[in-house]
Image (cartoon, rainbow, N blue to C red):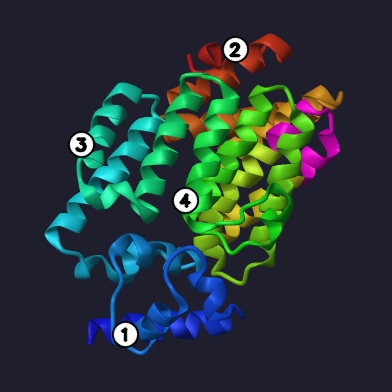
Amino acid sequence: MAYYLIGKLVRQLRKQRGMTQEELADGILSRTNLSRLENGEQLPHKDKLDVLLQRLGLNSHEAYSHYLSVKEFDFSVKCDDILSLIANNKNEEAETLIDELSAFPEFNEGIKKQLLLSYRAFIMINLKQDNYEIRKFILEALQITIKSFSEKYISDYFLSDQETRLINALSITYLNDNNLVKAIEILEKLKESFEASKIDEEQKFKLYSLVLFNLSKYYGLNKRYSDAVNICDYAKELCLKTNNMRRLPGFIYNKAYNLCESGHKEECIPLLYQAYYGFDMMEDNYRSNIVKNHAKEKHGIDFDENNC
């Protein structure tokens, strides 16, 4: 029954999204095996089902986590831990877990191999290693599920969460190579991909917000201040609509930064207060300090004195 329900869900969502079986299955499994899944005859491994559900805009953890085997659940927990460690720049600890997973044969091919390649690329970015070498890792990982991947066609792909993170990382490598135009071009295509999809707004925004945040940052660096402010205003509305408050202070600060750089200093001051106290409320000391230092340097505002 579990197989049937998941297969029925996949077929229903695929048709709602206007996707063919070939488009959904591309790089993940054969069209025949997807058909068997949709008919309740077969259930693929968790990693493949993850990508299918993510391409359809569904939270794969909520959809079927209670169907996982103990081994697959352990893999899933370790992968979540690795992402958390990388996000907090704890690269050696992340490498240890990656080495543990690489000892399992399941991680020597397919989507699980893509995961490990992507994790290693993210760590290389954290460590500011050679961007050309990082791009080789990213492209190798992407071509596991998008065999004919090309930067030119990013906006045409139906992307999983992992593929989205990889393409976002690709833009970072160009930014770090001072190729800001290329970095922006990639994120604009990624933004188009999200906007063309018909997935649930709340689920979409989890990674869409990352793309919008980086794009607003890149526009600012490229002195496209008006474009950056517009992105921040758009993202703010999405934050409120999807109740995703965690991203909101970041967009408020990016707007304040770009208003300041474009000469609208008075308008940005109340935004700095909002961003600072938003980060402070979430106990995000790293980002609240960024706002605090900017406020003191550019406007002579001392949040420590204001708190006394």
Crowding around mark 2 (Cα neighbors within 10 Å: few <14, some 14 to 19, many 20+) is: some
The label nearer to you, 3 versus 1, is 3
Is 241 in front, or is 80?
80
Instruction: Magenta stretch: give its range.
Output: 216-230
Crowding around mark 4 (Cα neighbors within 10 Å: few <14, some 14 to 19, many 20+) is: many
Residue 307, how many percent across, how many down? Answer: 49, 18
Measured Cα–Cα span from mark 2 to mark 4 = 40 Å
Residue 236, how many percent across, how many down? Answer: 65, 49
Q: Amino acid at mark 4?
A: Gln
Measured Cα–Cα span from mark 4 to mark 1 = 25 Å
Which residue, given by chain and number where applicable, does mark 1 sit on? 5
Q: Is residue 222 magenta?
A: yes
- Give left or right: position of 302 versus 283: right
The label nearer to you, 4 versus 3, is 3
Q: Earlier in the sequence, mark 2 or mark 4?
A: 4
Q: Earlier in the sequence, mark 3 or mark 1?
A: 1
Q: Is residue 262 above or below residue 70?
A: above
Q: Earlier in the sequence, mark 3 or mark 2?
A: 3
Q: Is residue 226 magenta?
A: yes
Measured Cα–Cα span from mark 2 to mark 1 = 57 Å
The answer to whether one can see residue 246 in this image is no
User: Mark on residue 100?
Assistant: 3
User: Mark on residue 302?
Assistant: 2
Which residue, given by chain and number where applicable, does mark 4 sit on? 162
